[in-house]
Image (cartoon, rainbow, N blue to C red):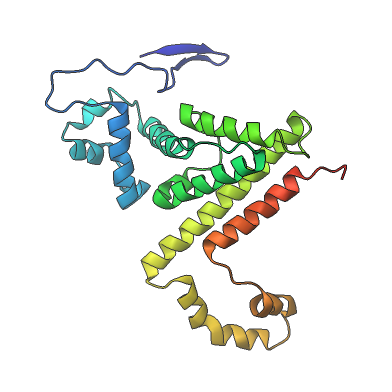
Amino acid sequence: MYLMDTAYGSAPLPVWERPEPQPRAAPVPLSRAKIAATAIRLADDHGLDGLSVRKIAKALGVGPMRLYDYVANKSELLDLMVDAVYAEIAEADQPAEWRATVLAIVHRTRAAALDHEWFADLLGARPRLGPHALAVGEATAAALSQAPGVRGIDDLQRALSVLSAFLTGALRAEVTERRTARSTGTDVTAWQTSLGPYLTRMLDTGRYPTVARLVVEGAHLDAEETFHHNLTTVLDGITRDPRR
């Protein structure tokens, strides 16, 4: 076991810093990248609840215990999977202008979450610190630091926190709706139609005038339009120069 000294005592080295095990004379060669790619395919098909070391090993054609030479536990496996998705987000060229960079990164993050719905379940809470996640974080922070209203490290921290909260909430809501549509066989339009008569009766009581305005007069945008509109609104707010 590779250990490092911390303020709280010895702890295992992160999976990113541990060397790969020496190659074995075995029919199936393994690597952390191969294990992560297989786990991602299984999670894409069956979700995180359907993911286990035994299932990954079976898909790879090896014994389950062999995987523990590469990852110590499921938490490390999830770290590898998440960072592989961040590699997809980080691989594209970044625009030169700060706002275009942030918009591009956030839209690529949404695209990745829709390709790998389980990814949205793992956003939020403590940050992911794999090399590709750090690269995306660096590109985002560097771009935001150039915004007119971000005048110091405190402003930058707040801007990143708000952007992260928006992104996590928006992606989880969109992924939840997709899952609900699949599990019920009813998309949001059909659901709204089925409840239309009831909602009309409730709004006709006059007790919910603001909700009625939202339903009748509000714009009904698709998911991508809604995401982009809300993203730009958030970005306008957190980067507005208060001196203007």
Quadrant the C terminus occupies: top right
Q: Is residue 207 placed above or below 23 in the rendered structure?
A: below
Name the residue nearer the viewer: 26 or 109: 109
Q: Residue furthest top?
A: 5
In which quarter of the view is residue 13 placed?
top left
Residue in the image at 49% along x and 75% along y: 189
Residue in the image at 53% along x and 62% along y: 223
x and y percent of residue 84 in the render?
A: 40, 35
Residue 12 visible in the shown view: yes
Residue in the image at 60% along x and 40% along y: 101
x and y percent of residue 146 in the render?
A: 71, 34
In which quarter of the view is residue 15 placed?
top left
Q: Is residue 130 placed above or below 12 in the rendered structure?
A: below
x and y percent of residue 190 in the render?
A: 46, 77
Q: Residue furthest front?
A: 96
Name the residue nearer the viewer: 117 or 217: 217
Q: Is residue 159 left or right of residue 149?
A: left
Q: Is residue 59 left or right of residue 47?
A: left
In which quarter of the view is residue 197 placed?
bottom right
Name the residue nearer the viewer: 48 or 189: 189
Quadrant the N terminus occupies: top left
Residue 127 visible in the shown view: no
x and y percent of residue 191 in the render?
A: 48, 76
Please state the total of marks drawn on the protein image. 0
Q: Is residue 217 placed above or below 124 in the rendered structure?
A: below
Q: Residue furthest right?
A: 243
Q: Is residue 225 placed above or below 119 in the rendered structure?
A: below
Q: Is residue 222 left or right of residue 214?
A: left
